[in-house]
Amino acid sequence: MSRWLVTLLIISALIIVFETYAFQAIRTLTKSKFIHYGWLLLGFLAYLNFFYIIFTYDRSSGQTREFQWAFGMLLLAMLPKLIILVMMFGEDVVRGIQKGISFFSREETKTLASRRSFVAKLALGLAAIPFATILYGIFKGKYNFKVLKYQLKFKDLPEAFDGFTITHISDVHSGSFDNKEKIQYGVDLINEQQSDVILFTGDVVNNFAHEMNDWIPMFSELKAPIGKYSILGNHDYGDYSQWDSEEAKKANFKAIKEIHPKIGFDLLLNENRYIEKDGQRIALIGIENWGKGFNKAGDLQKASEGIQQDDFKILLSHDPSHWEYKVKENNFNYHLTLSGHTHGLQFGIEIPGWIKWSPAKYMYKQWAGLYEEFGRYVNVNRGFGYHAFPGRVGIWPEITVIELKKA
């Protein structure tokens, strides 16, 4: 039996279980057969559409908006039903235990039926929460830009850079954009920060250089008096698409690199620049992508050639796993690293001072926000755009502003 057939059978069995419990719950809410079978039909259409997209997927087309929407509708169909499944199955377990240890009278049967109805209605009410939040995330959340501001103090920061400001953006993923007005708002919001420098940490596209064509004029409007610098992310290498030839892949990669000067960014490819101010300077180092389990084109040693041990250093590195495994304990002392990549999985719960959670935390030790170890910092930007899931739930698109201060 093929691996694909086994996978399909397992997924089909899970869907049947999901839909069976969800159907039982909806029947307690209304006796209308129109609603009963309409509910089943909507779920069936979401599953059918997703499987159709998967099995007809042309890898040479990269990740299409059709795939993103199919995935979004699948989550909309399944996640609320997961809550129903857990609650209804839990009630089944309790009921089974009670039946196993007692003799039932007719009154007890009525009590169990009443409790079943209550649990079903409660499950439906709770399931409405993820249903509504996913809908919001798809239609509004993905453009709910947030500006996060940090002030970082360093004893060895040159005096001239006391109060120096950085706007950090990451993960544009222009191939996913579908609303020029909202993207213009995001670009304007970046400019409103009036930072000294803008630093972009990779993934300008999903797969193909042409995805950025319509957005070049807009992103060319970004302004910073001291400069705009950028690096590549894992999606910029074309590794997630099928190519007719190696030459076609190389041509696309070349075109992606050429996007950066077109929008006014100095692309750093395992190289560095000094930023000078009032006779003093700090080092800006940019590496190609290096990530655990991903492309490892990044060469930190090469990127740091010509930099001095006592220079104040800002490192641009797309994947935060690079900081975890190669940077934070490096004796060359990279003071501040800027990363992106994780998107916070575009799904989670963040309430400042109380909770910060996303499934991303089980994949990356540093997955969103600012982290400090050994007196060195990494900021993991949650991303400007979105990818795979066509929305954001609780993890909003981010523009980071960092002010450097002399301690």
Image: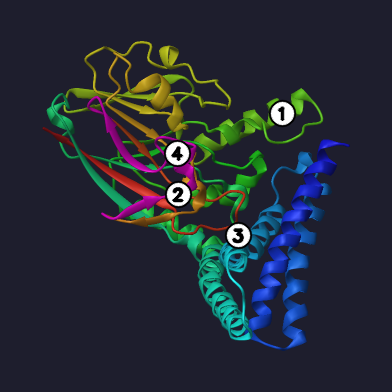
Q: Which residue is mark 1?
A: 249
Q: Please name which of the two marks, 2 or 4, marks the residue nearer to the observer.
A: 2
* Above or below for 205 versus 130: above
> Furthest residue to the right?
1
Instruction: Kindly identify the amino acid type of the residue bearing the numbered disc 2.
Output: Ser
- The CA span between labels 2 and 3 is 25 Å
N-terminal of the pair, mark 1 or mark 2, is 1
| Image quarter in which the N terminus is found | top right
Q: Is residue 370 magenta?
A: yes
Q: Which residue is mark 2?
A: 358
Q: Which residue is mark 3?
A: 178
Residue shown at the point (11%, 32%) measured from the top left: 407
Task: Answer left or right for 118 relative to 332.
Answer: right
Task: Answer left or right for 396 relative to 132.
Answer: left
x, y (%) of residue 202? 50, 36
Mark 3 residue element: loop
User: Which residue is nearer to you in this view: 215 or 325?
Assistant: 325
N-terminal of the pair, mark 1 or mark 4, is 1
Query: Can you tell which quarter of the image residue 206 is in?
Result: top right
N-terminal of the pair, mark 1 or mark 3, is 3
Instruction: Kindly identify the amino acid type of the residue bearing the numbered disc 3.
Output: Asp
x, y (%) of residue 362? 47, 39
Q: Which residue is mark 4?
A: 340
Magenta stretch, residue numbers: 353-376
Mark 4 residue element: loop
Instruction: Kindly identify the amino acid type of the residue bearing the numbered disc 4.
Output: Gly
Q: Are marks 2 and 3 in contact (CB under 8 Å)?
A: no
N-terminal of the pair, mark 2 or mark 4, is 4
- The CA span between labels 1 and 2 is 34 Å
Residue shown at the point (60%, 61%) measured from the top left: 82
